[in-house]
Image: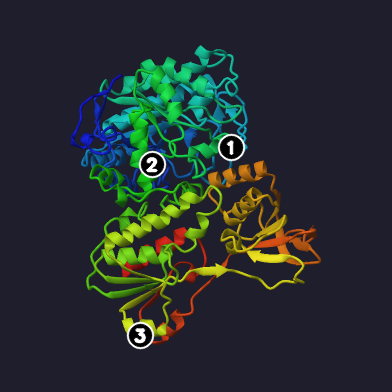
Amino acid sequence: MNTTANRNDAADSAFPHLFQPLQIRGVRLKNRIMSTGHDTTLPTDGLVNEALVAYHEARARGGVGLIVSQVAGVHETARYTSHMLMATEDDCIDGYRKLAEACHAHGCMVFSQLFHPGREIMEGGDGLLTVAYAPSVSPNERFRVMPRQLDTRMIKEIIAGYSEAARRMREAGLDGVEFVASHGYLPAQFLNPRVNRRTDDYGGSDEGRLLFAIEALKAIRAATSEDFVIGMRISSGERDEHGLSIDEALEICRRLEPHLDYVNVTAGTSASLGGAVHIVPPMAYRNAYLASDAARFRKTLGIPVFVAGRINQPHEAEAVLAEGSADVCGMTRALICDPEMPAKAEAGRTDDIRACIACNQACIGHFHRGFPISCIQHPETGRELKFGTLKPAARPKKVMVVGGGPAGMKAAAIAAARGHQVSLYEASQHLGGQALLAQQLPRRAEFGGIVTNLSRELELAQVRVFKGVRVDQALVDAENPDAVVIATGAKPFLPEMPDDGSVQVVDAWQVIRKEVKTGTRVVVADWRCDWIGPGIAEMLVNDGCNVELAVNGTHPGELLPLYVRDNLAAELHKSGVRVTPYARLYGCDSGTVYMQHSVSEQPILYENIDTLVLCLGHEPVDGLSARLIEQGRDVHIIGDSMAPRTAEEAVYEGLKVGTAL
């Protein structure tokens, strides 16, 4: 295997494998931590820009050994989104050069993914459907794309596109490229006998289906140099009945090995809803769940094997490396959440690492909505040009933060880190607000990590924290702060509705806290269409209840990131929860819950019901700000106390206020 056994000083630390260098051809990685290729939605006009350079440089500065930049299209037909990078013209070279120089300055190596989606086209550039090309006319289930079969001329054009794109990366000073054959994209479509039904040289047999990849990889090598790294990303099983199996993927890698310097193992496919969940697996999946797959590849191949898939903490990566499952660990979301994670781990500051909770909300969730990626815990991500440097306060102030949920915690930590004297007051005995409830729902325990992480930020910033103290006008007057931040959160919204008492009516918080007994037959009224309604339904089914989920939307989890939504849908289906969409709550009497179809306005009835659980959103709790404003005090209202939304908005507003004070 083409690796080094050299050890650096950190190899004697708690992470002897994680911080051991790795030599691949002419490239030396200083550690085994990688940021895998991932779309950021930061580029403009298909080119690397200042925002993307700042994003990656933050991670390079934080100590990551390898950054694989997001997919770069190799042909005009590769535009699978309207905001991707393109490597089809020489005008891309300057931006990539700036990216390479910025990361190299911190000892970080940079590869670029080379990409063609084939039939996996998400959107067109101007609202029109784009013509997608694939080896055969094999429809895509997820995006409902019926592709056009590639002719030999265009196949040759695309192969030449890989060559030219690689040349440009080499000229820009990048250290390598990654041939993307994962997730059902074009190379995987050629390799898959259930998708590639050609009978010419590029199909019809195992050799024919390999030909596209072989010619592309040879062309990349011919256009670069002997010290330039060429790797391949591939799914170790696409988790779909029509996708590549792990045995097929392993045999493909064995046969392509002479043309590769490493293999990067992931899972899933973009072609189906179930397979796509593995592209960015949510917290329902166990940590490092693909390590056993990678181990099979590493045992078979003689080149380094990289692996990703919910590797969120350095001790998880160390375990993967120590057991010999892989040579490098992709920790992309961990680095989105904490760009300084590698440096903190190497210095032994593991308690200071802001751990990713795999909520998917601001990273892949933003991408799917066409916005630059970020992180609900670290909103500085994707906003490096604005918030990348925390500036000391020009004049230290006495700041009083009222409320210890995510909004208040972030505001207090940022303000104190800038030099203000900050006191945070929480009415209950525990910090965390609604995050403490969220973590109690099935498969959501990891959400509580946001409380742990923000609590550590408070400690590091030396914020004075007072628990069990309800702030009133008198306390504010006694403290006499220069600024007051109101972050008092929200409470369940309870509507006025017909109700004769025959059905027990409770809110979601009461169910989560086990304050009520629901009986056997339960209706969950879900207005918000987020994770709460499905989570309550799943919790009650696990308790033996017969549950009906009535969603005032088109489907459960309508507002959630796609992969979280689809995972929830799978669990609801497996647990037997019956879901009714377009269901608007009206009221209840005589043991019957009445709904109205929100479009047809026809009635929907649920009979013989014991309990109706209301998941109808929240209303602000703010009984203090009006009087303080009348006094002329400097008051800032943030998070749910301003308007109930999500933890993302709460933390972001905490950052903004803490930065502005």
Label 1's element? helix
> From this viewpoint, is residue 82 visible?
yes
Mark 1 in CB contact with mark 2 (< 8 angstroms) = no
Question: Residue 130: x and y, percent?
Answer: 56, 38
Earlier residue among tags 1 and 2: 1
> What numbered label is drawn on residue 274?
1
Above or below, 509 against 30 in this view is: below
Q: Residues within 10 Å of mark 3 (few under 14, many from 20)?
A: few
Question: Residue 92: x and y, percent?
Answer: 34, 38
Earlier residue among tags 1 and 3: 1
The quadrant of the picture occupied by the C terminus is: bottom left
Which residue appears farthest toward the bottom when viewing the image?
631
Mark 1 or 3: in front is 3
Task: Residue under label 2, please give it.
Answer: 332
Task: Residue under label 3, please give it.
Answer: 477
Above or below, 484 against 174 in this view is: below
Q: Amino acid type of disc 1?
A: Gly
> From this viewpoint, is residue 234 visible?
no
Question: Residue 435: x and y, percent?
Answer: 48, 59
Q: Quadrant of residue 655?
A: bottom left
Q: Amino acid type of disc 3?
A: Asp
Q: Residue at x 32, y 59 (%)?
A: 457
Q: How many angstroms separate mark 1 from mark 3 (CA)?
A: 56 Å
